[in-house]
Structures are given as structure tokens and as C-alpha cells.
């Protein structure tokens, strides 16, 4: 390949949002696990909780800023993650061809996908719903545990716990596949752009239907 | 409880409340309910209860979102064994607030008044009923008379009939064992202001093992086993105070129990939750019971006795009786609305004519509940000698005994009564 | 790889999302976000309901009682007549009154 064109996949505001989200969520996950398993001595537990709170505030501000400054992206993301077709079921049947590719070095035909494949859509829904629940429940648990009825508070505690488990488990998959697909990783963390051929292979519907050429 | 405690005497239970470290999430919610700052442990780390500061009110227990605090004393087995023993007369001393809460663990709506069903279930379990409302009426007689004596002493210089010392004004109520221990550990200078009247539970125990044993139960005091059934965890502590063997001392002086080992006025205290567990253990479904009468002389009680469980109730009951005793005329209206409700500090002025001295007096009363939030300014005023009040009712728990630390835990509720302000826990 | 200026030749069409979709989906998002807020708010408002319900129960017990004054309790009067004499009598003082102790000394 000598000449290649690029597609802007992740605009700057999305990348900045994602930088802060990644940093704060990783911090929250690590401190959250420490707190849940009570791994440390008392002062260190306190420090872990303080870091957890600060990271939580940072993540909240990040989410709020993105929500208000890039509401169109939020809506677009919501639309894409919640739009399913028969192709998504077929995609799940072969898990996007990734196990075959990674484990057996075998290429299988994959149903055509949009900007996000079926797995990414599922992850996107979990991030949207779970992230929102985590942020809201975290704030109630931090600021109002005394005033909210204890049954409600305990339910909110369970929501916080289960949502965090789901997202932490997904995080491992997300990290692995994100690094495995190095072009995507670079796009999100460096310059936002992805080679045209690569996108045409992985997201043919997106490339076909939703792009415009810059003159 | 491995640390040595300092604020307990021999025989007293040091600390009714402890925290299960496996359940504790370090969220700090309990600290917002603790009236004495007895809960230690940094934000994020598991918490502990400092028994020396703890007044055993149990508010942390009923308000923890994760159910981490628990009672260290569980007399259910012991009481069940006594109920099974036919030689023992087991007297169930039922506090007012129990009858509006015991229905909840049996699936009835919150606040259901189930006096009749409760009597029936308890008699089925083998209890003889001593309604603590009866003892509440007795408390009004003693505490109200004491107040009249203190007021007439302060206003008209009246002397005590038996030459004893008369305490100062304002008089504080002494029914709430958490409040009594709060004074003893935080403001001992105010001990003379506490009414010397025992709490209804302790009056009931002392009466049951003297007059009751002889006249009502027709049994030897040693075979009378008194069980306080209370909305309160601090009552477990109160019952263990060593001075509360007054029935034994009394009988010994009378020569009745010279050979007997000392026995306490109250042998065991069950919280409302404990009673529900006991009944369920005995397969008694309180909700399915028919209404029954108490069946003993000690089950007779008045409306004044039953409102003891509400904040303002002791004051209202005392005012009803004190008014009639002081003026000699009946009250036109029994309800004192000013002392009802959930306001932190309620006060009222009652102007009346003391018939004995032929003078008008204005009695200023105050009612305080939720002592964590409300007691300090009132107490500081009294310490400084600036208190405008003559009689002050204090209950530790927000709302009074009906929201006590021994009540069934209501998941849709919080004891947070004041304005909702976020608290951003940090260290 | 050629480094053109601009660095990319393609981007998403601004019409990936129609106006109607934007309003509909955006409205649903905001409505769903409001739900937990409403839920927590109502929990906060009703948090003292159990206290009020139990309080009402006891006041109802009082309002429906035949006798509503402690000094009219016949059982109490009988106890004084047969046993204790009267309030603050020596028997009363011994059985119905108590003393308190200063526990602060131990703390300091």
C-alpha cells in the first residue's frame, strides 16, 4: 500500500471525552475493587475512598460536559447502539469472526456492520445505561446515604455494585480488542483517523451510507 | 468488645451495639445518626463503636443501609426457655410504641395499632401481660408529683414532706435510658435536674416483683420473670444497671427474701424485633390473632400512658395530670397540640391557677427529640442558668420511642427528620 | 502513507441523524434520566412516613381510650391504696425512684 485515504472516525471532542473517561474509569475500577474487597489498612482504605470520590467527580464532570457540549454525539451514539438488525444476530452467532481469527488464524465471512459491530453495540448500551446508573448511584451513596431511606440506599448500593461488575468485565474485553485493533486504538488515542480500507472491511455499511468526501 | 471500657459499672452490659465489619461499607451514613460521635473508623474503612461513648440508642442500627450494626445481646432463647418452664410466671412488659410496630414484621401496614392481637399472641406464647402503659401512668403520678413539688419549691419555697432534698428546675424527664446515659457521660452537672422517677420499664419491674407477685400473680418474687418488650436497645443496658435490684432489696428488708440471691427488677429485655422473632419461632402469627383483653390488673391503661411512645407524649400526659392536680378543675381540652409533631424543639406555655397558693403560674415546657440534632443548645442554656423552661421532655430518637432503635426496620424510612442537605463524607 | 493537509479525506455526513430522530431520541434520553431523579426525590419526601404512621397509631389509641388521664387509672389508684400510699411516699421513693451516677469522671 502506498497511497491511502483516511476517515475521521473520532472528532477531537470525542477523543478528549474518552481520554478523561478512560483515566477516571480505570482509577475508579481499581479503587472500587480495593474498597469492595477491603484489601488495605484503615488509612489506606480512606485514601482509596478519597481517590475513588475524586475520580468519580472527574468522571461526572466529564460526562456532563460531553452531554451538554456534544449532545448530538450522545444522541447519535444512542441511536447507533440501539439499532439492531438480523445481521447483528448473525454476527453474534460467529462472534464477529474474532475467535476464529485470533485463535485459529482463519478468516470467516462476517455480516456487514455499521460504525459499531453488534458486540460494540452491546458494550455501548452497557456503557450508556451502566455508566449513568454508576454516576447517579455513586452520588447518592456519597452525598445522601443518611437522608435516603435505608432500603432505597441499599438498593442503590446494589445497583452500584452490579453495574460496576458488568462494566469492569466488559472493560477487559474492550481493552483487549482495542489494543488488538491497533488502528482503532490509534484513532481513539492519537489522531482520530482510520485508514479507509480498514473501515471499509470492518464497517462497510458505515463507509457506504454515512460518509462524505471532503473537497 | 475486647477493649476495656471505662464508663460502665460492674454488671452493666458494656455496649449493646456493635458493627459487623463484613457488612460495613464505610459509607459514614451511621455517623450522621449517632448522637455522641461514638462511631469511629475513617470514611471508606470499616467502622467501630466506641462503647464508652455509645448510649446504645440503636439509631445507627435502624438506619444503616447495609444492616451492619447489630445487637450484642440476644435474649430470645433465654426467654423461650422461661416460657417453657411452667413454674415461672413470665411477665411481658409491653411498651406503648410496640403496639404500633409489631404488626409490621407480620406483614401488616406500617403504623397498624394491634394492641388486642399483640395481647392474644403473647398470651398464647405464655406471657402474663403487664402493659407498660400502666407503668407509664404510674410514672406520671411520680414524675408529675415530683415536678409539682420542684415547681412549688422554686416558686413558693415549699419544703419536702419527708425533709428530703428537692431538685432544681428545669426538671428533665428520665424515661429515655439513652438520654439518661447521655447526661451521665456528657453533662453530669445536670444529674440533679433529671427526674428521680424511674423509667416505666423499671417501675413495672419493681412493682411486678413486689406488689404484683403478692397481689396479682400470687407467686414468689423469685419465680416471677420480668421481660421488658421495648422499642429500644438502650433498655437492655438500663435493665443491667446494678441499682435496679430494688425489688430484691425491698423484699429483703421486709424479711421476705432473706435467703434469695439478688434478682434484677427486669430479667430480660426484648426489642420489638426480638419479640417478632420469638413469636415466629413459636409459630405464632400475630396478624392472624383475634383481639384479646390483657386480662390482668396491670393491663389497665389510659390514653395518657399510651402516648408516651411519641415525642411530646410524656409532656402531654404530665400536663394533663399536673393541670388537674394544681388547679383542681378538669381540662376543657385534653390535646396539647403544641407539643405534638416532628419539630426539633417544641415549647408551650401553660398558664394556670395554683389552688393551694391561690396564685397564677405560667409553666413553660419544652419537648426535645432527636438529641443528636437538637439537645446541645437546650442543655447549654440550662448549664448557663438561662433556660426559660421549667420542665423539659427529652427522647433520644427522632420522633420518640415509636422510631426507637429496637423497632422493626422500615425499609422505606430514614430517621433523618430535618432538612435534606448533602453531606460529602471525606475522612 | 501520505501526509496530506487535511489529514483525512472522509468524515461522517452531518446528516447521519435527521432532525426528527434527534428530537425523539434526545427526548427519550432526558426522560429516562429524569426517572431515577424522581424516584430518589419521592423516597426523600416520604422518608418519615413510618414515623408519622406510628405516631398517628398511638394518638388514635389515646383518642379512643375510655380513660385518658393517668390519675384516673383505677389500677394505679389501687396500687397506691393497697401498697405504695401515695406518690413520693417512702415506698414509692424506694421502688419507683432512683439515682444517677457521674460517668464522666471515668472518661477524663
Image (cartoon, coloured by chain):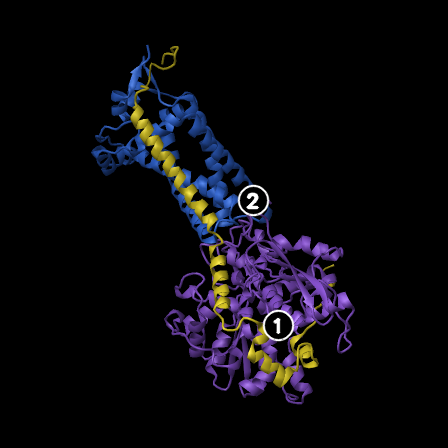
Chain colours: A blue, B purple, C yellow
Residue C6 visible in image: yes
Q: Position of residue A27 (x, y in %)?
A: 49, 37
Residue A209's tag is none
Residue C102 visible in rendering = no
| Viewer-proximal residue among B154 and B375 | B154
Report the residue marked by disc 1.
B139
Which quarter shows the C terminus of chain C? bottom right
Picture quadrant of residue A206 = top left
Q: Is residue A115 left or right of residue C92?
A: left
User: At numbered mark 2, what does the secondary structure look like: helix, strand or loop?
Assistant: loop
- Residue A80 placement: quadrant: top left
Q: Which residue is mark 2?
A: B423
Circles 2 and 1 on the same chain: yes
The subunit letter for the residue under badge 2 reads: B
C34 left or right of B388?
left
Question: Foreground residue, C38 or C4?
Answer: C38
Q: Which residue does the image show at 45% across and 39% down from the upper left?
A: A135
Q: Is residue B334 above or below residue A131?
A: below
For label 1, count other residues whose C-alpha is less than 10 Å away and answer few (under 14), some (14-19) or many (20+).
many
The quarter in which the N terminus of chain C is drawn is top left
Across and down, in percent, residue B270 comes to 52, 70
Relative to A158, say whether B193 is above or below.
Answer: below
Amino acid at each position: 500500500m502506498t497511497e491511502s485515504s483516511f476517515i475521521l472516525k473520532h472528532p477531537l471532542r470525542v477523543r478528549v471525552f474518552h481520554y478523561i473517561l478512560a483515566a477516571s474509569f480505570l482509577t475508579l475500577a481499581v479503587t472500587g475493587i480495593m474498597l469492595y474487597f477491603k484489601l488495605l489498612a484503615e488509612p489506606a482504605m480512606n485514601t482509596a475512598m478519597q481517590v475513588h470520590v475524586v475520580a468519580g467527580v472527574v468522571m461526572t464532570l466529564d460526562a456532563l460536559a460531553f452531554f451538554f457540549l456534544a449532545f448530538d454525539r450522545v444522541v447519535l451514539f444512542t441511536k447507533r447502539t440501539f439499532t439492531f438488525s438480523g445481521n447483528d444476530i448473525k454476527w453474534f452467532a460467529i462472534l464477529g469472526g474474532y475467535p476464529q481469527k485470533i485463535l485459529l488464524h482463519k478468516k470467516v465471512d462476517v455480516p456487514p456492520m455499521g460504525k459499531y459491530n453488534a458486540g460494540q453495540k452491546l458494550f455501548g448500551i452497557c456503557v450508556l445505561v451502566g455508566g449513568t446508573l454508576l454516576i447517579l448511584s455513586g452520588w447518592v451513596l456519597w452525598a445522601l446515604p443518611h437522608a435516603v431511606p435505608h432500603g432505597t440506599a441499599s438498593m442503590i448500593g446494589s445497583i452500584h455494585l452490579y453495574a460496576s461488575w458488568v462494566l469492569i468485565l466488559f472493560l477487559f474485553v474492550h481493552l483487549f480488542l482495542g489494543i488488538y485493533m491497533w488502528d482503532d486504538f490509534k484513532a481513539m488515542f492519537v489522531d482520530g483517523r482510520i485508514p479507509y480500507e480498514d473501515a471499509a472491511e470492518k464497517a462497510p455499511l458505515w463507509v457506504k451510507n454515512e460518509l462524505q468526501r471532503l473537497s | 468488645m475486647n477493649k476495656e471500657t471505662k464508663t460502665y459499672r460492674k454488671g452493666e452490659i458494656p455496649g449493646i451495639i456493635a458493627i459487623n465489619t463484613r457488612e460495613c461499607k464505610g459509607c459514614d451514613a451511621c455517623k450522621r445518626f449517632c448522637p455522641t460521635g461514638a462511631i469511629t473508623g475513617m470514611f471508606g474503612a470499616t467502622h467501630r463503636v466506641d462503647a464508652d461513648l455509645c448510649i446504645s440508642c440503636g439509631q445507627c442500627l435502624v438506619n444503616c443501609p447495609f444492616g451492619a450494626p447489630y445487637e450484642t445481646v440476644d435474649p430470645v432463647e433465654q426467654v423461650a426457655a422461661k416460657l417453657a418452664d411452667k413454674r415461672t410466671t413470665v411477665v411481658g412488659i409491653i411498651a406503648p410504641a410496640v403496639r404500633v410496630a409489631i404488626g409490621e414484621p407480620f406483614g401488616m401496614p406500617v403504623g397498624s395499632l394491634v394492641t388486642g392481637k399483640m395481647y392474644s399472641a403473647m398470651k398464647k406464647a405464655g406471657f402474663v401481660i403487664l402493659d407498660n402503659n400502666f407503668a407509664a401512668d404510674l410514672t406520671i403520678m411520680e414524675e408529675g408529683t415530683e415536678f409539682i413539688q420542684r415547681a412549688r419549691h422554686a416558686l413558693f419555697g415549699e419544703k419536702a414532706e419527708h425533709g428530703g432534698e428537692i431538685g432544681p428546675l428545669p426538671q428533665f424527664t428520665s424515661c429515655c435510658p439513652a438520654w439518661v446515659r447521655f447526661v451521665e457521660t456528657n453533662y453530669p452537672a445536670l444529674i440533679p435536674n433529671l427526674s428521680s422517677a424511674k423509667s416505666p420499664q423499671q417501675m413495672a419491674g419493681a412493682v411486678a416483683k413486689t406488689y404484683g407477685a403478692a397481689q396479682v400473680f400470687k407467686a414468689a418474687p423469685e419465680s416471677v420473670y420480668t421481660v421488658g418488650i421495648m422499642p429500644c436497645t438502650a433498655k437492655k443496658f438500663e435493665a443491667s444497671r446494678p441499682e435496679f435490684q430494688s425489688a430484691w432489696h425491698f423484699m429483703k428488708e421486709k424479711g421476705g427474701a432473706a435467703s434469695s440471691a439478688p434478682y434484677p427488677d427486669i430479667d430480660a429485655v426484648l426489642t420489638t424485633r426480638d419479640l417478632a422473632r420469638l413469636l415466629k419461632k413459636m409459630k405464632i402469627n400475630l396478624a392472624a390473632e383475634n383481639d384479646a383483653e390483657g386480662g390482668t390488673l396491670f393491663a389497665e391503661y389510659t390514653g395518657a400512658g399510651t402516648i408516651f411512645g411519641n415525642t411530646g407524649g410524656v409532656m402531654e400526659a404530665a400536663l394533663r395530670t399536673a393541670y388537674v392536680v394544681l388547679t383542681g378543675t378538669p381540662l376543657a381540652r385534653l390535646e396539647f397540640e403544641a407539643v405534638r409533631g416532628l419539630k426539633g424543639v417544641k415549647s408551650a406555655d401553660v398558664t394556670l391557677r395554683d389552688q393551694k397558693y391561690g396564685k397564677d403560674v405560667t409553666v413553660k415546657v419544652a419537648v426535645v427529640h432527636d438529641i443528636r440534632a437538637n439537645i446541645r443548645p437546650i442543655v447549654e442554656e440550662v448549664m448557663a442558668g438561662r433556660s426559660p423552661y421549667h420542665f423539659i421532655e427529652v427522647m433520644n430518637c427522632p420522633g420518640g420511642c415509636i422510631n426507637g432503635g429496637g423497632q422493626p426496620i422500615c425499609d422505606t424510612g430514614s430517621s433523618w427528620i430535618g432538612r435534606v442537605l448533602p453531606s460529602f463524607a471525606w475522612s | 502513507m501520505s501526509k496530506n493537509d487535511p489529514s483525512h479525506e472522509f468524515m461522517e455526513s452531518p446528516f447521519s441523524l435527521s432532525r426528527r430522530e434527534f428530537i425523539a431520541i434526545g427526548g427519550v434520553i432526558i426522560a429516562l434520566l429524569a426517572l431515577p431523579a424522581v424516584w430518589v426525590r419521592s423516597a426523600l419526601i416520604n422518608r418519615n412516613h413510618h414515623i408519622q404512621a406510628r405516631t398517628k397509631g398511638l394518638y388514635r389509641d389515646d383518642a379512643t381510650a375510655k380513660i385518658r388521664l393517668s390519675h384516673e387509672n383505677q389500677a394505679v389508684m389501687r396500687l397506691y391504696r393497697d401498697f405504695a400510699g401515695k406518690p413520693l411516699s417512702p415506698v414509692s421513693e424506694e421502688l419507683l425512684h432512683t439515682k444517677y451516677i457521674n460517668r464522666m469522671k471515668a472518661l477524663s
